Amino acid sequence: MTSRLYALMAFFLLAFGLLGLRAWQLQVLEHEKYALRSQGNYLKTERIPAPRGRILDRKGRVIAQDRLVVDLVYEGGEVAFKERLLPLLGLKELPPGPAVLLTGVPEPLLPTLAELTAGQKNLKLSERIERTYPNPISGPVLGYVLLANAEQVKQGYGPEEEVGQAGLEAALEPYLRGKAGVKAVEVNARGERLRETVLEEPTPGKDVVLTLDLDLQKAAEKALEEALTDINAGRRLHGLPPAHRVKGAIVALDPTTGEVLAMASAPSFDPGLFARRPVPKEVQALLQDKDLPLLNRALQPYTPGSTFKLATSYALLEEGYVSPSTTYRCSPYIVYGGQVRRNWAPRDMGPMTVREAIAFSCNTWYYQAVATDPLGFVDRLAQRARWLGLGEATGLEVAERTGLLPTRAWKQKTLEEPWYPGETLSVAIGQGPVLATPAQIARMLATLANEGKKPRLHLVKRLGEEPVAPRLDPVPGRYWQVLKEGLRETVTQGTARHILGDFPVPTGGKTGTAETPGKRLGLEHAWYMGYGPAEPGTPYPPLVVVAFFENGGEGSRVALPAARKVMAAYWKVPSP
């Protein structure tokens, strides 16, 4: 037993002796060697990019999201396995480095490239986050992202971080943007990465649920495209060259909540182009396109034409200029101030009340109604039109123009000229300096359909887990029913009867054809605004649709059929 204890003691003494000898060797004999090696390694911190929040439609279908993308990066110099690598990349020779040899490496190719690049310091697979659009909607509405510019980097963005630059991507940037994480990276003297440690995990941005319905959105976009046939049919009648692209917008909303169910603008673009690296040449072509495909026409102001007659009718009734039973003759023309002012129809259409004036869009009826007090009426008209939602922001989360409601004071200040009585006659039928956006026209019609409850329009249904509450503002009025009767008569016997008279759902609406500079026939702005159901007890959900076509010609020829298609898609009824 004693001998075994001595042997065990001898073993431990030897082991501790060896450890002490090794420690002396490292700390004394090789101190300088390891000190230099330690000094050659250093820690630095790097950002871990945070994924942007997703954008979804009202039913949870993904419109925009981030994905992890792998690029093949070449730093220059010789690489191994070049004879295998180049054919995979479709290259004959390697370009001068540094360069990205392949962006967005396809998933089936990743294992092969990982094998070929393993151990090669000048050839690596680099991960990054890229915005992708599984169900893209109109580019002018959705917007796009780009890498942060110098000014945005100063504000705290990372140089590789994508930032919303237009449309919903820009408007929702504070919610979609996540919080970047931080990692510590140990690098040696040659810049080689030795190890990484995550110090703070990135926080993804909030998901945003839109009010848009992808199915109705696609129907609106398709209706815009198909309108080219109707536009060119009208141009042939007037001896004009054909249009090659549609320029217009369609807005559809729930009037009871202000939720925008569809917003389409044409021409459009693929928002995914801006997310690619490097940015393709097609982006530069978009920026230089004279048809302005980046412009969201649903939020741009245009001459509203006869759709504005609803605002005029509302002001005439509420201000006491006419009553529901007041009649004027719808003559082919009147002479006012030495000028001949014509109706759109060359025949005498007989006596009309405000209902028939709306239904048949009689210009001369409105001329006579406002001619009794043209200087006083124009200011009252501007005020009443603003109450309906024109001339002001609609409440949408994206940037929008507010349009123009002219007054005597506005003209004196802007043009340093007095207001002339004849100008009131032009404004009364939606001509002259009055301007409104398709979204504003939709809001005005929703206010009429709601009988004086003006909705705040919104494109966002939920921010993260927080729902967006609808808001309805009261608008004073006593004659909502009279105005709705005029809108209904437009469809049953007026200017929209030929398209919507046999529609399965009872609707009301108003056509509009707005003259443009030069007053060339066939190049007018085409409008139609419609709503339904227009009769109580009809088992369909409420809907407002506005269709607008820039230089599209007659509203009843172009905008009205487009609006019908959107209505049919929403209510799921046949539309021959």
Image (spheres, rainbow, N blue to C red):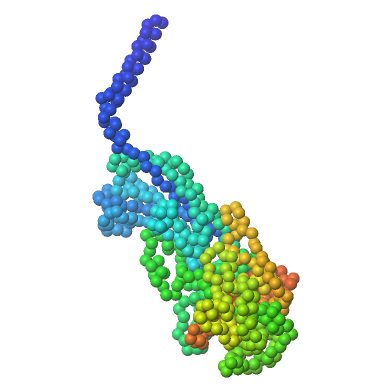
- Image quadrant occupied by the C terminus: bottom right
**Quick check: 36 above or below 151?**
above
Give the image location of residue 138, x and y in percent.
Answer: 51, 67
Observer able to see residue 501: no
Question: What residue appears at the point 29 percent right and 58 percent down from the top-left corner?
Answer: 91
- Image quadrant occupied by the N terminus: top left
Give the image location of residue 289, x and y in percent.
Answer: 41, 73
Horizontal side of 468 relative to 539 (left or right) equals left
Question: What residue appears at the point 58 percent right and 82 percent down from the top-left corner?
Answer: 427
For the residue pair 326 and 574, the one nearer the viewer reads as: 326
For the residue pair 433 and 124, the one nearer the viewer reads as: 433
Give the image location of residue 226, x and y in percent.
Answer: 52, 76
Question: What residue appears at the point 55 percent right and 71 percent down from the top-left corner?
Answer: 402
Observer able to see residue 178: yes
For the residue pair 421 and 384, the one nearer the viewer reads as: 421
**Quick check: 151 above or below 554?**
above
Tell me the quarter of the picture where residue 408 sits: bottom right
Tell me the quarter of the picture where residue 308 sits: bottom right
Horizontal side of 296 relative to 36 (left or right) equals right
**Quick check: 199 above or below 371?**
above
Give the image location of residue 140, x and y in percent.
Answer: 49, 67
For the residue pair 85 and 393, the one nearer the viewer reads as: 393
Question: What residue appears at the point 39 percent right and 57 percent down from the top-left corner?
Answer: 150
